[in-house]
Image (cartoon, rainbow, N blue to C red):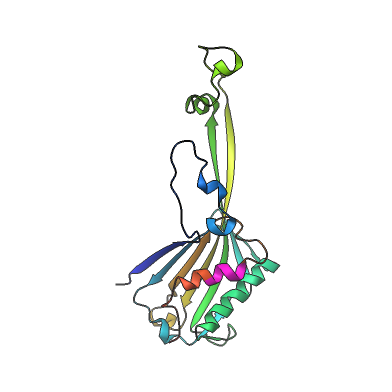
Amino acid sequence: MKNFILTIGIAASSMLVLAGCTKDPLDNMSEEESRIYITNHDSTAAFSSYTTFSVADSVAVIDNNKLTEKSLTDVDAAFIAAVKKQLQDRGYTLVAKDADPDLGININRIYNTYSGIVSYPDYWGGYPGIWDPWYWGYPGYGYYWPGFYGVYSIKEGALSIDALDLKNADKDNKIHGVWNGLIRGSGIFRPGAGDSQIKALFDQSPYFKRS
């Protein structure tokens, strides 16, 4: 049976939990400190048995679980180059996709949009004392808002990398994934951030090497 092992890492070296009225430390985190690195691999895969690899020449853009395009922006190209470097540094040989590589690497930009509704009376009722009516000269009063609602939408982005076992694909007519890396957080797709993020992801997977 194939078992998949999940590893999660955070870029922040330490996090303090503060109580009372102290400002939330998460508000002071840099983009790099906000990032979460998640890796998942097949525990039965023999990573040292693979010799060659090929990386897709574009990045798949997946929006709300739908493939919308294949992209090659400067940022996409930087991620592709960073993945190639990490795998070559680990002893694998880069070959063309038509040269029967042992591993196929896909890189994906994943976006999910979440929507919700805020009830403003509930909002103020849930945070009593932020501005007591006494502040305005009306002690003993309470807030009142007419019944209305607000709609919000949040779009979250992540980078996903998949390593596929092409070497053994013909044995059961299936292509099995042997490793996946996911990066979440702020500023993932900023220019110049690709090398450090990909390195952090692979540093979390010391078993992923030729020998």
- Residue 113 seen in the figure: no
Quadrant containing the C terminus in the rendered view: bottom left
Residue 178, image x, y percentages: 42, 74
Q: Nearer the viewer, residue 92 or 141?
A: 141
Answer above or below: position of 43 versus 183: below
Which residue is most to the left? 1
Answer above or below: position of 20 versus 175: above
Answer above or below: position of 132 versus 76: above
Residue 74, image x, y percentages: 70, 68
Q: Nearer the viewer, residue 190 or 71?
A: 190
In the picture, measured across the screen, residue 6 lies left or right of residue 90, that is left
Label total for image: 0
- Residue 13 seen in the figure: yes
Q: Main secondary structure of the magenta part?
A: helix
Dividing the picture into quadrants, the one containing residue 143 is top right
Q: Nearer the viewer, residue 73 or 210?
A: 210
In the picture, measured across the screen, residue 41 lies left or right of residue 93, that is left
- Residue at image position (54%, 32%) is 118
Quadrant containing the N terminus in the rendered view: bottom left
Which residue is most to the right? 74
Based on the picture, tell me whether residue 139 belongs to the magenta stretch.
no
Residue 79, image x, y percentages: 61, 70
Dividing the picture into quadrants, the one containing residue 198 is bottom right
Residue 57, image x, y percentages: 63, 75
Q: Which residues are magenta?
A: 194-199
Based on the picture, tell me whether residue 198 belongs to the magenta stretch.
yes
